[in-house]
């Protein structure tokens, strides 16, 4: 079962002082194995890096865009998507908020007219979800390949929707039977946001962070989710909090190989691969190890694609779609 979870993304510099910020205690994601190569034994969330810790990310420079060209002797360094703090590696979204602000001020000259404003973090409006077994959106999500010659299916049976905004009308959901009430929220500041499921989790099924890069006018996303092999994850953006007119970014992991896809959906049906791929990663897409899929990617606030991409601005507000369970890729179809 997969859950699509909308919340709101705003770009508005006028209300920066009114933001509420929730501090999340840094946590360490436990691993069941350690890396052992030669005489090097790496700790939790570390791996062997041929240049050692020369360019390793830490919580003070986690969002620096400065290019690193240094290289030291091979040593254990934090794995992709993690940052070092107090000689341990934590998920970079768990770096203390003061470190995020320190990294931002030391490495950018902010243009507050184009700052990413995160949703208020103390969200207590009714976040309700459909009961198990209700086919609320679509029994399957199909993806076409880039050549448009073949349809590939991502199973999303019994899709479940979670609504984080009381402004969403119930008729936006195909089946308005709501059976449970919960709280969900976004933590962040003017340039950074973090969301996780279940709410307040330490060992999360899905967590995502986003960071606005003022110097390039881009938004950088990082996702960590539980996923078996041949699985997909991602994030979407929608004006209504539904699949109608949704701008979607999907990462597929097939046999350990990751691929990044810019997609869109016009209705409750089959999302299409965007002919103009406006999402990229400056390094590698991510890793899929021990049942944990970690990915990161970047897109412009305004990609210039008026057909399939949403344009984030100070006046254009969209809701996130969080597929917290992802879905299985059909075998031998790509």
Image (cartoon, rainbow, N blue to C red):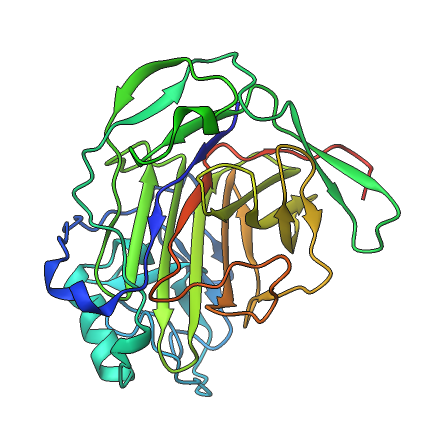
Residue 101 in which image quadrant: bottom left
Image position of 268 (left or right of 107): right
Image quadrant where one finds the C terminus: top right
Residue at x-position 48% and y-position 54%: 36
Image position of 208 (left or right of 193): right
Q: Nearer the viewer, residue 73 or 188?
A: 188
Tell me residue 89's x, y (percent): 31, 57
Q: How many callouts does the rendering have?
A: 0
Residue at x-position 54% and y-position 53%: 287
Q: Is residue 89 above or below residue 229?
A: below
Tell me residue 170's x, y (percent): 40, 24
Tell me residue 147's x, y (percent): 85, 55
Q: Nearer the viewer, residue 124 or 234?
A: 124
Tell me residue 279's x, y (percent): 58, 64
Residue 189 in which image quadrant: bottom left
Q: Is residue 87 above or below residue 51?
A: above
Which residue is the extreme one toward the right?
149
Residue at x-position 37% and y-position 55%: 317
Q: Nearer the viewer, residue 30 or 238?
A: 238
**Viewer can see residue 43:** yes
**Viewer can see residue 89:** no
Q: Nearer the viewer, residue 246 or 235?
A: 246
Image position of 96 (left or right of 158): left
């Amino acid at each position: 079962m997969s859950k699509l979870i909308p919340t709101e993304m705003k770009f508005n510099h006028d209300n920066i002082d009114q933001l509420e910020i929730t501090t999340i205690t840094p946590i360490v994601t436990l691993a069941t194995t350690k890396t052992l190569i030669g005489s090097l034994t790496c700790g939790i969330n570390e791996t062997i890096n041929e240049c050692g810790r020369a360019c390793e990310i830490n919580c003070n420079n986690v969002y620096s865009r400065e290019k690193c060209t240094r290289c030291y002797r091979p040593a254990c360094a934090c794995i992709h998507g993690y940052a070092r703090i107090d000689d341990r590696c934590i998920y970079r979204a768990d770096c203390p908020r003061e470190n995020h602000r320190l990294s931002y001020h030391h490495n950018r000259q902010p243009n507050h007219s184009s700052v990413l404003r995160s949703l208020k973090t103390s969200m207590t409006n009714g976040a309700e979800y459909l009961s198990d077994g209700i086919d609320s959106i679509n029994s399957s999500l199909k993806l076409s390949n880039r050549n448009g010659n073949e349809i590939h299916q991502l199973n999303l049976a019994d899709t479940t929707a979670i609504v984080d905004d009381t402004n969403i009308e119930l008729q936006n959901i195909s089946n308005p039977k709501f059976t449970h009430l919960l709280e969900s929220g976004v933590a962040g500041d003017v340039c950074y946001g973090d969301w996780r499921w279940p709410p307040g989790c330490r060992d999360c099924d899905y967590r995502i962070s986003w960071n606005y890069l003022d110097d390039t006018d881009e938004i950088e996303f990082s996702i960590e989710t539980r996923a078996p092999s041949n699985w997909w994850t991602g994030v979407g953006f929608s004006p209504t909090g539904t699949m109608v007119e949704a701008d979607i970014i999907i990462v597929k992991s097939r046999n350990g190989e990751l691929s990044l896809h810019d997609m869109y959906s016009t209705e409750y049906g089959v999302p299409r691969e965007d002919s103009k791929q406006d999402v990229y990663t400056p390094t590698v897409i991510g890793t899929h190890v021990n049942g944990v899929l970690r990915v990161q990617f970047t897109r412009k606030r305004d990609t210039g694609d008026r057909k399939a991409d949403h344009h984030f601005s100070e006046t254009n507000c969209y809701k996130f779609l969080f597929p917290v369970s992802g879905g299985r890729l059909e075998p031998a179809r790509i």
